[in-house]
């Protein structure tokens, strides 16, 4: 058949019409007045056969700028990291690729164990007691944490640093509308959360304080000081959004007394595929275990003493009373969580630590080279793998010029903060070579000097 991708034949169509007792497709629209029906021809291309269509779509796809065609220095929440080849091999296996919800533990042991291992590794990275079986992405995980803090403390105000990812901030505002949580934004100062403003805003009505570590600008927030401010109020929670790769080297939030740690596992085994799908993680203390959104997989033994895995806790309204439910989240990201688990297992503890260290060192090298070319790095202090550079020009125009030289430039910060016009957020990961960094600095320096 020339058009084998079409869903039905004429005989299929006639059979369906006969079954429902009508002669033509037009009869299906009898209730729609004639004068508002579209009578002309749609302005679309005529149909093509499979070969021609595939060729056309391939030509269109080849026009895309990709991580294979260009060298990327763009981060801002989605990063170009090393993905071990074994990741695709494992997640492409049909028993994982097609698995969805492991409600029947007797036939879902592999899926349940994979999720359990993901939870375990997240707990080790964050130094928290429990982690759930994953969430949609880092932004929704953070918003769920905000709502949990309000529900647990019975308070209706959260203080959120404006140094978190701007898209996460927008998600928080959306999630907070339902339960009527007031979101108070705390400004950033010199690339870090303004602790003076935080001290002034926190009060007995504050359910939680939200910071990102490292923050959106790549700077490392002083969590110990933030915890001291949080401790001035009873029951107020410290909620931290963290890049889990950074926790391979940095002191984990759990050691600073964080109550909830969330983030995005895209950095482990999940490619930068047009911004999604991702895999959010959600870790907390044992005290809050029964308030965690989503579900938890636990380890047990069967009647013969053999190791096994089961769904231990499910706190959504489908499983428990609506008034006791913590969230209406309906799914996890099991396949992406598996990809992250395989990536972390492949790297191992030392490999993960080395990978994190390489991000720090290469970003530090970039900073040094940029300054040597006369470009101003906006913020001082410790940072992870991103830094803000004042390019002194329209960033969109600078990125267009970089694109012509084979580089995907950094994020234009003026898109989220007018005060940062002319500032670019540049990311450097372990896969960037010294030559790539040097070439990027040269091209950016030449544009800066124009």
Image: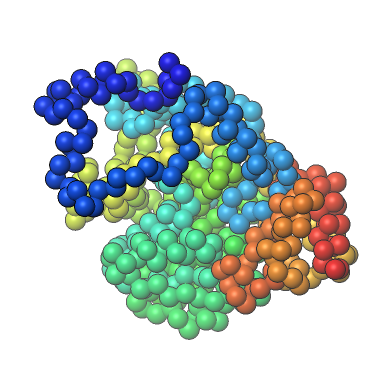
- Residue lying at the far bottom of the rendered structure: 200
Identity of the residue drawn at 55% across and 45% down: 274
Q: Is residue 425 left or right of residue 28?
A: right
Residue occupying the far left of the picture = 21
Extreme right residue here?
A: 372
Residue 266, how many percent across, how many down?
55, 44
**What residue is shown at x 25% (from left), y 48% (from top)?**
37
x and y percentages locating residue 213 in the rendered image: 58, 60
Estimate the x, y position of residue 343 in percent, counting from the top left. Answer: 59, 34
Q: How many labels does the image show?
A: 0
Q: Quadrant of residue 14?
A: top left
From the viewer's perspective, is residue 27 above or below residue 357? above
**Where, by quadrant of the figure, is residue 28 drawn?**
top left
Please indicate, yes or no, whether residue 381 appears anywhere in the rendered image: no
Q: Quadrant of the N terminus?
A: top left
Image point (43%, 53%), residue name: 141
Q: Quadrant of the C terminus?
A: bottom right
Residue located 29% across and 26% down the image: 104
Q: Can residue 210 be seen in this view?
A: yes
x and y, in percent, of residue 41 in the image: 37, 42
Left or right side of 31 for 368: right
In this view, 336 is above or below 198: above
209 over 79 or under it: above or below:
below
Nearest the camera: 120 or 211? Answer: 211
Location of residue 148 by image quarter? bottom left
Q: Specify the color scheme.
A: rainbow
Relative to residue 242, is residue 378 drawn left or right?
right
**Foreground of the two, 345 or 39:** 39
């Amino acid at each position: 058949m020339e058009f084998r991708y079409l869903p039905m034949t004429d005989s299929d169509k006639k059979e369906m019409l006969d079954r429902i007792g009508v002669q033509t497709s037009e009869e299906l629209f009898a209730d729609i007045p004639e004068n508002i029906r579209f009578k002309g021809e749609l302005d679309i291309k005529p149909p093509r056969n499979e070969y021609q269509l595939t060729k056309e779509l391939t030509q269109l796809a080849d026009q895309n700028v990709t991580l294979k065609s260009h060298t990327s220095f763009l981060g801002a929440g989605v990063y170009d990291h090393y993905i071990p080849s074994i990741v695709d091999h494992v997640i492409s296996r049909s028993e994982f690729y097609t698995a969805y919800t492991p409600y029947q533990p007797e036939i879902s042991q592999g899926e349940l164990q994979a999720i359990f291992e993901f939870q375990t590794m997240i707990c080790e990275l964050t130094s928290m007691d429990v982690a759930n079986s994953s969430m949609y992405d880092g932004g929704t995980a953070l918003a769920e944490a905000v709502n949990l803090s309000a529900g647990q403390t019975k308070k209706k105000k959260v203080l959120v640093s404006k140094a978190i990812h701007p898209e996460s901030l927008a998600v928080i505002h959306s999630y907070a509308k339902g339960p009527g949580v007031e979101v108070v934004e705390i400004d950033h100062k010199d690339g870090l959360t303004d602790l003076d403003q935080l001290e002034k805003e926190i009060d007995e009505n504050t359910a939680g304080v939200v910071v990102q570590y490292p923050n959106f600008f790549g700077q490392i927030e002083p969590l110990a000081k933030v915890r001291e401010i949080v401790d001035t109020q009873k029951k107020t929670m410290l909620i931290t959004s963290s890049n889990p790769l950074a926790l391979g080297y940095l002191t984990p939030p759990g050691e600073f007394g964080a109550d909830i740690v969330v983030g995005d596992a895209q950095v482990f085994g999940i490619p930068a595929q047009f911004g999604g799908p991702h895999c959010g993680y959600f870790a907390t203390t044992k005290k809050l275990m029964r308030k965690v959104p989503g579900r938890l997989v636990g380890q047990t033994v069967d009647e013969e003493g053999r190791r096994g895995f089961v769904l231990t806790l499910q706190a959504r309204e489908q499983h428990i009373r609506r008034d006791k439910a913590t969230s209406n989240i309906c799914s996890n990201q099991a396949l992406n969580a598996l990809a992250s688990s395989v990536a972390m297992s492949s790297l191992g503890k030392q490999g993960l630590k080395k990978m994190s260290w390489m991000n720090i060192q290469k970003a530090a090298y970039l900073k040094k080279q940029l300054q040597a070319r006369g470009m101003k790095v906006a913020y001082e202090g410790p940072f992870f793998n991103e830094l803000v550079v004042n390019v002194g020009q329209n960033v969109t125009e600078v990125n267009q010029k970089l694109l012509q030289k084979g580089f995907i430039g950094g994020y234009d910060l003026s898109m989220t903060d007018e005060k940062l016009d002319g500032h670019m957020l540049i990311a450097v990961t372990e896969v960037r070579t010294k030559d790539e960094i040097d070439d990027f600095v040269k091209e950016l320096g030449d544009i800066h000097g124009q």
